[in-house]
Structures are given as structure tokens and as C-alpha cells.
Amino acid sequence: MKKILVFGAAVLFSLSSLAQTSTQRAPIFDVHVHASKINPNFANDMSPWFLSNMPGADPNEPMPKFLSSDGAITLKAAKSDKEFQDELLATMKRLNMTIVVSGDASVIRAWKKASPNPERIIPSIGFSDNKGISVKAFEDSLKTGFYKVVGEIGLQYQGISPSDPSVDGYFEVAERLNVPVAIHMGTGGNGMANLTAPKYRASMGNPLLLEDLLAKHPKLKVWVMHAGYPMIDEMVALMGANAYVYVDVAGMIWSYPLEEIHAYIKRLVQAGFGKRVMYGTDHMVWPKLMETSIGVIENAQYLSHDQKRDILYNNAMRFFRLDK
Ligand SMILES: [Zn+2]
């Protein structure tokens, strides 16, 4: 019942926000957006909080679907690059937003070109192992000045620890050039290792795996994407030992059960880290995902007005040193 009430409130927020203009709205900072060309064959509609039901599957039967669209509300996937870009830029204007975005550089350039506020679209460059971009090319890319952030770093999908020596060169560059880095840790949905990423390891999402990396690179500024969900004790322990580590709540905020999400965010804030939790979506193909995800924070009963503003904006401005 409680779930249904919160659920309803999130929908209400999304509708009321549509009526407001950017000048009325307090700013929002989404630190976790993905840019890619839309493939209409793979851009499926999605019901938020679909992981509330992970049915018992069997390897001898057809694979379970990664996403589901049969929940109480369904977000439509954009069907073309143009539709997604138009919707994203309109949402950014309406909600007074700044975003950090990784992915296809040509898509990011197109968004910046079409935006009235291109400086509010902050490009980020990621890597997933040492077999893609070389360390030298990675450094050269950062030195062009186009990229201001390193992420999403997808080592977990390759079963690699962030402290693995094979990728240390990338982190050394980021530390030396004073560029913040974002590492995917935690969330994998239902059956990531079975469905799309056979090398994915839940164990490689343990936040404590960051300890050696942080010890080796004391000036490196790291945020843990998806807040290391569901390893809350390890996340709290890491943030306690390492005062500069922040987290984002992207992905988990619209996929896992709402009560589970709230319990996780509440624990982070309760443990004293309300100044180090950043809002993010993991935005991919669903234009209305922004409003849906913001609604979760706006409607959190356990957060004060100031704590919501910190998560939705202030913490990211401080993390990226944009508040000076
Ligand atoms: Zn991720």
C-alpha cells in the first residue's frame, strides 16, 4: 500500500513539473546520462521498478527478458535520434538541468550543437578494459578539453576489479590531469551474467575493491555509479575511510523495487553521507525517465528539503568543483 502511494506521488510530480518553466524550477544535475544512436529494434518500452518481480527462470527455457513493460506505468522508448534529442533538450530546459553524458561522441556533439546552453552538457569518456582505447589515446582525448569527466568505467562487466594493475594507467592519467572518474559498481539487474554480459561478476561491484586504487592515487576523485547497490555496508565503510568518494543513485532509482531504493538511499543519508549522494538516471532511451527518477527523490519522506536539494544539485556542483 505504502508503495502504491509513493508510486502515485511520483506520477503526480511528473505531471506537475510539466507545467512549470525553468525559471521557476530549482536546478537539477544528472551526473549519469548515456548518449547512443537509437536502434528502434532494441529501444523497448519500460515500466519503472520492474525488478520488483524476478520470476524463477530455468536455463532450459527461453531467457527471461532484461526489461519489462507490463507494470502500472510504462515509459515509451524514443524511436529516433531526433526524437530523443528533442525530448532531452526540452526536458533539460523545462527542469533547468545540467548533465554529464558518456557514449557516442557524435551524438554528444549533436546535442551540444542543438542546445541553447551547451556548457550544461558535460562530455565524459569511459573504458571497460585495456583492450579498447589505449592509455595514450585516452590521455590525448582528455587533453583536447572536450571531455571533462572519465566514465562510465565498465570494468565490472568484464569481471575486472578497479584496482587491477591492467587498467592502472588510465587512472594515473585521470589523477594527473585532475579529471573526476565514475566507476560502475553494483547493479546488474536480473541475470546480467546470463543475458548480455557473461564476464559480469557481482563480486567485482564490491565498493571495497576501490581501496587499493584510492591508496595508490590519493588525488583521484572517484564517484561510485549506482552507489554500489546492494552492498550498503561496504559502501558506507569505503566512504568512511575515503572522504572524497561520492556516489550516484542512477539505474537503481528506477529499476529496483521502490521500497528497496528508498531503504538504500535512506541508509546512505542516515550514515552521514547526505552531502555525497548525487542524483543520476542512467538515461538511455526513455524521454520521461528524468521526471520519473526525480520524483523518487522529491517524494522521499525521510529527506529534508535541503537534503533533496543537495542530492538533486548541490552535491554534484561541489563534486565537479563548479560551485567556486
Ligand atoms: Zn552503470
Image: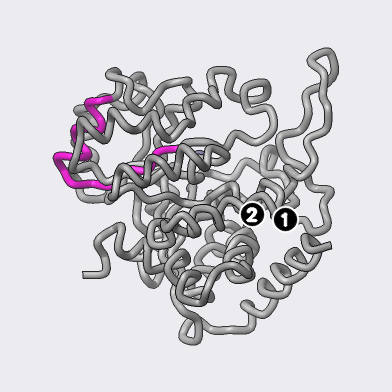
The residue sitting at 40% across, 35% down in the picture is 153
Amino acid at pointer 2: Trp
Q: Nearer the viewer, residue 225 or 91?
A: 225
Q: Nearer the viewer, residue 218 or 184?
A: 218
Horizontal and vertical percent position of residue 163 = 32, 25
Q: Is residue 172 magenta?
A: yes
Q: Nearer the viewer, residue 303 or 107?
A: 303
Q: Quadrant of residue 174?
A: top left
Q: Is residue 185 above or below residue 255?
A: above
**The residue stretch that appears in magenta:** 168-184
Q: Is residue 104 left or right of residue 75?
A: left
Residue under numbered circle 1: 76
Would residue 36 be counted in the magenta stretch?
A: no
Q: Is residue 256 left or right of residue 95?
A: right
Which quadrant is home to the N terminus?
bottom right
Mark 2 C-beta closer than 8 Å to ligand 1? no
**Looking at this rendering, what residue extends furthest in the bottom direction?**
24
